[in-house]
Image (cartoon, rainbow, N blue to C red):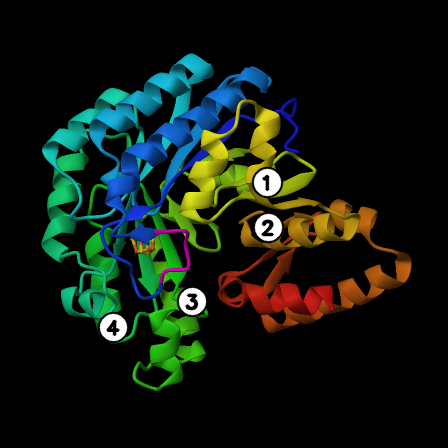
Amino acid sequence: MFNPACDVASLYIHWPFCPYKCHFCPFVALASHDEYMEQYHAALTKEIRLYGEYAQKRPIETIFFGGGTPSTYPSDLLLDTFGILNSTFELAENCEITLEVNPGTVTPEKIEAWTKAGITRLSIGVQSLNNQVLTSLNRHQKAADVLELIDAAAPRFEVLSIDLILGLPGISQQEWEELIQQVVTWPIKHLSVYFLTVHEDTPLYYGVARKKINLPTDDAMVTTYEWTACMLERHGFMQYEVSNFAKVGYESRHNSVYWKRLPYKGFGMGACSFDGNSRFQSEKNLMSYLNSVESANSMQDLTKLSIVAETLTENQVWIEQLMLGLRQKNGLAWDSVYKKLSHSELMTFEAKIAEFIHLGYVSDNKIRFWLTTAGRAVENEIVVALLQ
Ligand code: SF4
């Protein structure tokens, strides 16, 4: 069971409803289920209250509303959630509160409500400005929606962040470069650039398998990624993680909690939690989630919600430390490696790092080692090689 005495300062709240299901989506997301929004909201807030009765009270530093599409959360219900969060927890004065937003789902009335609620960051799913490509992937948003949203939101929120997907089918190198040249002129403080990943059992997966969709080659993606990192840095967006770039001081504090392996508590279907020793994931089926929460009377009852409850072994902790450490700009301290590996394992590890330094993928100052931009483009492969 999630340890309620652990030092949680970060909350994740999952809103699974989406206006459509994108063909590349691997998330716990539901299109055409809007009639369940109110019932889900009632379950979600009950889960928060039950947890609050047992949790250690300490100021909450970050809250992240993810999805799904949290910008479809009806404003009156969202404000009700904030009322419950405020009465259940003490929110730190400078609490970072992020809401994921899909262009095309925003109204002036929602922006008003989000400001009133105290949301500090909007994380906007831009992905691309090519309407045709997005529509072909069943993502029904228009470039005009993005521009309108940026204009309306910029004066109201401390930080605007955008997500882009690198490697979408049908986007040429030139079009990508024009997109980057355009977004660096926007009033944004943070950017996430994700490689398109083909997840099994998605329409994109079947399109690629049947050769109806052609993706760029790995080499082309790596070249584009390196160009992008360089271009963003030139415009003041410093890379602090494999996929994340920010103006100085505007890094995502919430995501840093994940990367630093600090505890966090998730609420809602499919939400993940970590108490410092064990990882949990809640029920991913809507009806099972609703039934479990509706019949719960205590935090103990909520343990039935977990479909994953795993206490990490020492080896799993090491794998996480290596993977998450290498994703970050500062990489890993050699000290943490010395503590984990036996003498012979260390010799092999050092030899592999020396080879990666030779190839230009890793830098090292004898105290820490970290990935170069070229290394970040192939981070997965490097981690796999180091763990073998
Ligand atoms: S909007 Fe996001 S969560 Fe919803 S279907 Fe598309 S990718 Fe998935």
Q: Do the residues labelled 2 and 4 touch (CB within 8 Å)?
A: no
Q: Which numbered disc, 2 or 4, marks the residue that appears first in the sequence?
A: 4
- Look at the numbered disc 1 and give the secondary structure of its residue: loop
Let me know if residue 109 is in the magenta part. no
Q: Is the magenta stretch mostly helix, strand or loop?
A: loop
Q: Identify the magenta region.
A: 25-29
Quadrant of the image occupied by residue 208: bottom left
- Look at the numbered disc 4 and give the secondary structure of its residue: loop
Give the residue at mark 4. 171
Q: Which amino acid does label 3 sit on?
A: Thr
Position in image of residue 177 (x %, y %):
25, 66
Q: In which quarter of the image is ligand 1?
A: bottom left
Give the Cα distance between marks 3 and 1.
Answer: 24 Å
Q: Are marks 1 and 2 in contact (CB under 8 Å)?
A: yes
Give above or below for 55 relative to 255: above
- Report the side of 12 relative to 156 (left or right): right
At label 2, counting other C-alpha atoms closer than 10 Å, the crowd grade (few under 14, some 14-19, many 20 or more) is many
Q: Quadrant of the N terminus?
A: top right
Give the Cα distance between marks 1 and 4.
Answer: 34 Å
Q: Nearer the viewer, mark 3 or mark 1?
A: 3
Q: Which of marks 3 and 4 is in front?
A: 3
Give the residue at mark 2. 324
Give the residue at mark 3. 197
Quadrant of the image occupied by residue 72: top left
